[in-house]
Amino acid sequence: MNKKISVAAVSVLLLAAPMFALADTLTRQLQFGMTGSDVSSLQTFLAQDPTIYPQGLVTGYFGALTRTAVSNYQTRNGIDAVGRVGPITLASINAKMGGNTGADIYAPSLSGVTVSGTSNSITAQWNSSEATRGILYYSTSWMSMTDVLPNDVVIQGNSASVDTTLRSSHTITASGLQPNTTYYYVVYSKDASGNATVTAPETFKTFN
């Protein structure tokens, strides 16, 4: 037996870690061992976020620390973390450094949130306005949510299998639940720039 409930997505979080625009833009691809003023510009840009480049050194030399910082930036922005500034990373950084589009500071919006389940599972489906990573949180008790600056939220409760793939259509199942039990749940989406949205807690009761 299976039941489905539709719930309205309520955005309760809009957080961002904006990169401030710089006058410089990068004109070539960069990788380990290279030097130049553009490497300094890259390092200056990366150093604006200490979670990406905690050392913050601006040396003009693309060394191991810069390579790690580039990998961190790529991971944050949904780019393969190869540690070099190739065409995709170059375009992404230039868009923020040159102020052409600025940093993404908008949280994704969620729609079409539905849940269905059985005696020991719950499946949540929803759409996000942009590609995001999704998580289904659930708990037998009320879940509290705490903002964690600059760009995340801590949710009390268990999490189902986390979908780390950036996508705009999500389906996540939590299994191993107790039958005939009421669970609180929320769905959570975070975009490549670290902006996150969660729904307000709702309840779902598994079958006997």
Image: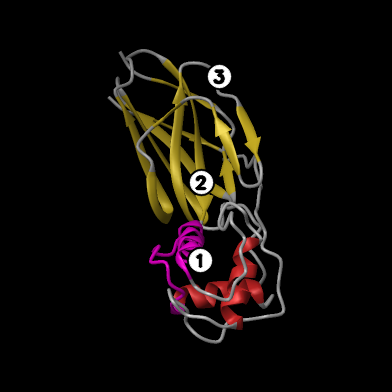
Say what amino acid the circle numbered 3 marks. Trp
Say what amino acid the circle numbered 2 marks. Ser
Q: Nearer the viewer, mark 1 or mark 3?
A: 1
Q: In the rendered structure, find residue 66 and report the number of the disc placed on it.
A: 1
Distance from Cα at disc 1 to Cα at disc 3: 43 Å
Q: Residue at x 63, y 62 (%)?
A: 47
In the displayed structure, does residue 13 sit left or right of residue 84? right
Distance from Cα at disc 3 to Cα at disc 2: 20 Å
Q: Is residue 73 magenta?
A: yes
Q: Residue at x 65, y 42 (%)?
A: 13
**Residue farthest bottom in this picture:** 27
Distance from Cα at disc 2 to Cα at disc 1: 29 Å
Q: Residue at x 66, y 61 (%)?
A: 48
Identify residue for label 2. Answer: 189
Percent position of residue 133, x then y: 45, 49
Camera-side residue: 1 or 46? 46
Q: In the rendered structure, find residue 142 and report the number of the disc placed on it.
A: 3
